[in-house]
Amino acid sequence: MSKQSELELENKLIAQLVKQGYENILIADGDVLLANLKNQLERFNQTSFSDREFEIILNHLEKGNVFEKAKTLRDRLHITRENGDSFYVRFFDKEDWNTNLFQVTNQITQEGTYKNRYDVTLLINGLPLVQIELKRRGLEIKEAFNQINRYQRHSFWSNRGLFQYVQLFVISNGVNTKYLANNKLQSVKQTFFWADVDNKNITDLFAFAKAFLSTSHLAKMIAQYVVHNETHKILMVLRPYQYYATEKLVHQVATSNDNGYIWHTTGSGKTLTSFKASQIIMDLPNVHKVVFVVDRKDLDYQTMLEFNSFKKDSVDVTDNTQSLVRQLTDDSKLVLTTIQKLNNAISKVHYEKSLKHLQDKKVVFIFDECHRSQFGDTHKKITEYFTSSQLFGFTGTPIFKDNAAKNDLGKRTTKDLFGQCLHKYVITDAIKDQNVLRFGIEYVGKYKRKSKTFIDIEVEDIDKAEVFKDPKRLEKIADYIIAYHNQKTFSKEYSALFAVSNIETLITYYDIFKRKKDEGEHDMRIATIFSYGTNEDDEDAQDYLPDDDQLAMAAEPTASYKTSHTREKLDSYISDYNAMFHTSFSTKDGQQFENYFKDISKRLKEREKTTFQDKDRLDLVIVVNMMLTGFDAKRVNTLYVDKNLKYHGLIQAYSRTNRILGEQKSQGNILCFRNLKKATDEAVTLFSNKDAIEEIILPPYESIAEKFDEALKNLLEIVPTYQSVDDLMSEEDELAFVMAFRRLLRAKNVLESYTDFDWDDLGIDEQTFEDYKGKYLDLNDKVKNDRQVHKASILDDIDFELELIHRDKINVAYILQLLAQLKESKSADATAQKKAIIDMLTGDVELRSKRELIEKFIEENLPYINDVDAIQDEFERFWHEERIMALSKICEEENLDKKQFRALIDSYTNYGREPLRDDIFKCLDNRPSILKAREIGERILDKMKEFVEVFVQGMTG
């Protein structure tokens, strides 16, 4: 049976959509698209527009980027009609979304930098709001995702930029179907399957169309569940479990006074879910106010940032109990506070008069992580004080009888406090959907240094305090972390947390690492934070940012010696931090301490930004409890553990590492220096089921090695030697090689994260692998070159996943050291050394672009340098001259003003912002015609990026 073609998929899909209420219309090109838009806007607005009026509308629609156009879509445009009347033009009805007009078309052709033909387009009120890209059965749908990215570059901006109004993309090969928001910054990891309410994925294209693309559901998703992220200026869309949870909460508030809770596993994005639920609930007519409650001061701040990123100024943190009372009594519809302040507000007599009028109002309380230990008493107070209140909780790890702690109220569960679980999405669901990563767990009892000698860290199953505190053991663990940290974090491209049992042990560890750094044994940037004077002796206590009164108590002369000692120690560690990052934090008051915490958080969180600079990098944070719950940073990929964890505490701590981020981060690394195997299995069983352990935890090293060998066998069938790549006859053959080597790269990426990794275990040696990699990178260069000369290629839709190509950090400073060695070497060794340097440049993604120039320096300059110490100065002079010539060449070829173009480059380099088209045109002597403008702008932008890649990136450090 032949495979179903793309055209057959298209025709069958359109036929189904017509049955679902879409009008099928033929739109061949941009002119017909504009004519149809005029017609549909007239029908939708129940009027007709003159040509002049429609031109005003088009000029309005053309303004802005994708993010700004999403706002235009939801707003109205005021125009003065030719007869002098005022009129408000609507583009989309977000309140009564079923009144919108729905059409489907296919094969619209638009010409930008290239001519592109789009598969299936869904038009609402004449605007293209959903674009569906199909691949024939058997191909990865990732290639459809890459095709969308290509259309973003090449043609969506043409013809008044109407395709920049697309809110959602759908990609499918018939068998697998996913959807995503229109956000060109995202990776394929931000594409989602739709599912039913029980989290069963709907992958078939036609089942997806029935469930997701029904006119009512699709319009509702666009109206309510596409979110504008103000911080990053991007669109986001809710995943199915977020949608169902929000719908359940809204329905519960609208139809009853019953409480409930949402069980969504840690890392699945419950902050976005809770924000969207809060936003919709606070607009319900029967709701007076929504109060979102977190249990710690640090989460208060983090949640505020996230809420305000979804909607600017949507919420303000209550600084103290007084400001909370003020917000509860003013017209604020959404209030964010901590449980401590809420407890104070309803417990203290002098606030009673201010809050009395709220007692019979419907106030909806939403609790983040609703099982915290402080919650028991407050729950009772809230329900007694606010007689018409409704309480909802979010949790990634509910409290059941098995993991409930005894307190004054007995062993109370999440169900006891909140009643029915309204929606459930457990860790196995999230891993299946690739919304969070699996864990790669290694239990370290012995380890081998590079010399292959084994060192005992501890004997398994020993559980004696004196063994765990033994300084020799702690020293060995520090040695282990130093030995393997680079391997675990891809040469510090990611950060790690180190969870230890108590503050006394933390102090010992910090001092060991500091001494070893002073002795030159490592160069890691290490920080620590703990709340001195609170919870110090309780391993299981929740650590949080203390309020000012707690800090003041710790500073009293009557405070214990231990408190004073730990505070002094922390101050000395903060001084180290200040010296490292040129900051000025301390523990002298609550705000200073809070700012220190925020700065640590920021360094970890902002590593994922393209503008992050290595000088701000923090490698390891040692903690007792802080940051092990509620803290999210995608570039944290490793957790070292030297403390006993169990149940929800264990899952919460492990989950700091498993946020999705590109292809390189394939799992969260957990390195346990205690035997937590039984505790891990029990926790996984409690929060999913006993059969889920293999789904959540990566298999042993040997199993991954087998997958690598399978991928290698497939590669060798296509290209038996690396030289065979040069003999591939067609682009189809090259595509087969690229995909086969990409699979091998993925397997190697996972293998390398294991401390057992050894090339001797594999069916290929490292040099041969590097040779294949060089050919793989050659093809990537070929695709980039074809793109610049506007040559179409089937490889253009392939993601080469260059982030998987990793080696120890090689920069120009390191290459200069090698050049110095080359200069001093004997002539017999020089040829081999020079080849090794060139091979290194060829195999490094960042330095590859500099290979030609560095070769030129070796050939033309190095022989004439007599003093080895002068190599760096001579190289910098050479590089500066080449940079000036390259810049002059671009400016001459494109008729650019050199000063203005250099300013554009500086802005791009410093802030990561691509210049706007108008910014580029300001550098031109003559503004190009509209027909040529985009093509010229794209070409200049490509040249600018190539210039930065060669002359700027990787030139420091």
Image: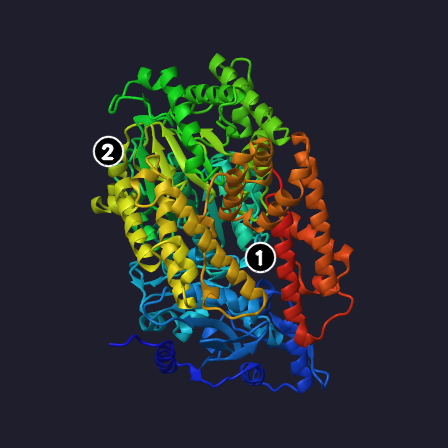
To which residue does mark 2 refer? 678
Which residue is depicted at the point 50% across and 72% down? 129
Disc 1 crowd rating (10 Å Cα; few below 14, some 14-19, many 20+) is some
Q: Secondary structure under badge 1?
A: loop
Which residue is depicted at the point 38% across and 59% down? 737
To which residue does mark 1 refer? 233
Picture coordinates of residue 290, whole percent (x, y):
48, 51
Picture coordinates of residue 841, whole percent (x, y):
53, 45
Between 148 and 857, the one nearer to me in the picture: 857
Q: Secondary structure under badge 2?
A: helix
Q: Which mark is residue 594?
A: none
The CA span between labels 2 and 1 is 45 Å
Picture coordinates of residue 231, whole percent (x, y):
57, 52
Q: Residue 36's image quarter?
A: bottom right
Between 712 and 659, the one nearer to me in the picture: 712
Res. 630 visible in picture? no
Query: What residue type is disc 1 on?
Result: Lys
